[in-house]
Image: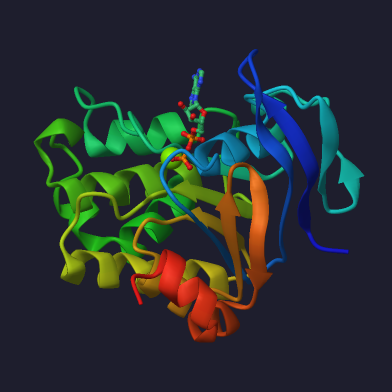
Amino acid sequence: MSFLIGETMRGGYGGADILNGCTIAVDKGEIAVIVGPNGAGKSTAMKAIFGMLPLREGRVTLAGQDITALSPQDRVKAGMGFVPQTSNVFVSMSVQENLEMGAYIRHDDFSDTMEQVFDLFPILKEKRRQPAGELSGGQRQQVAVGRALMTRPSLLMLDEPTAGVSPIVMDELFDRIIEVAATGIAILMVEQNARQALNIADRGYVLVQGSNRFTDTGEALLANPEVRATFLGG
Ligand SMILES: Nc1ncnc2c1ncn2[C@@H]1O[C@H](COP(=O)(O)OP(=O)(O)O)[C@@H](O)[C@H]1O
Ligand SMILES: [Mg+2]
């Protein structure tokens, strides 16, 4: 019984189903990675797990509790942090204001958490008074991840956190994500840099047309000739 399970999820945006019974799970301290072709339903699966898409079938459980009926806001209170694929920072607000916005559900003193985010991403401390829109792509992604960490989530969901960044910045971001997982947080991540992401994944999911095409450890998927030929470019 995993910490998070999106179980046999079926649903879409009103027309034909986009998710066709896929199951995604991750445990605390683990990194799970979803890969697959464009339009496979990876972002849709993340939205479904976060409660932004009603399920026609299936359910979502967190720490053994069925949370299928909860709103996204209540899922944040239950311990989920979500960094969506697009528009994941407030560009006109400063870095620090973005982090403060991330803490919106907290009524306690969150300055320690902000310091932890600054320890994880030192450049954000340096640039804390700058508008997020002035930062590089990689730095903006750090703001987005940091913002999600401000609620001290037990599950961190990242939709393509390395989109548009250089290989060096990608490696650095993956190192930080490994650090976050090592603190006991469950990480669920969609990645188009499939090979590199599976390399750090405890679990990997190859999603095709809203279904699990392959489900295995990251290592086993990287070694699977069919996965390599079809999804990893050989
Ligand atoms: N808001 C939306 N309304 C209608 N259809 C959508 C919406 N978002 C995505 N889709 C469709 O759902 C399918 C899966 O999209 P998505 O989950 O974004 O794929 P992926 O993240 O794997 O590239 C695509 O056919 C896409 O056109
Ligand atoms: Mg997507």
Residue displayed at 32% across by 57% down: 118
| Residue that protrudes farthest toward the top in the picture | 14
Its colouring scheme is rainbow
- The one of 117 and 73 positioned closer to us in this rendering: 73
Position of 207 relative to 69 (above/below):
below
Residue 206 relative to residue 64: left or right: left
Position of 159 relative to 88 (above/below):
below
- The one of 54 and 103 positioned closer to us in this rendering: 54
Residue displayed at 40% across by 65% down: 194
Residue 41 relative to residue 195: left or right: right
Residue 176 screen position, x and y as percent: 38, 69
Residue 214 screen position, x and y as percent: 64, 66
Location of the N terminus (image quadrant) = bottom right
Residue 34 relative to residue 166: left or right: right
Residue displayed at 52% across by 75% down: 226
Residue 148 screen position, x and y as percent: 48, 43
Residue displayed at 20% across by 43% down: 128
Residue 233 relative to residue 92: left or right: right
Residue 17 screen position, x and y as percent: 68, 26
Location of residue 26 (image quadrant):
bottom right
- Does residue 131 appear in this view? no
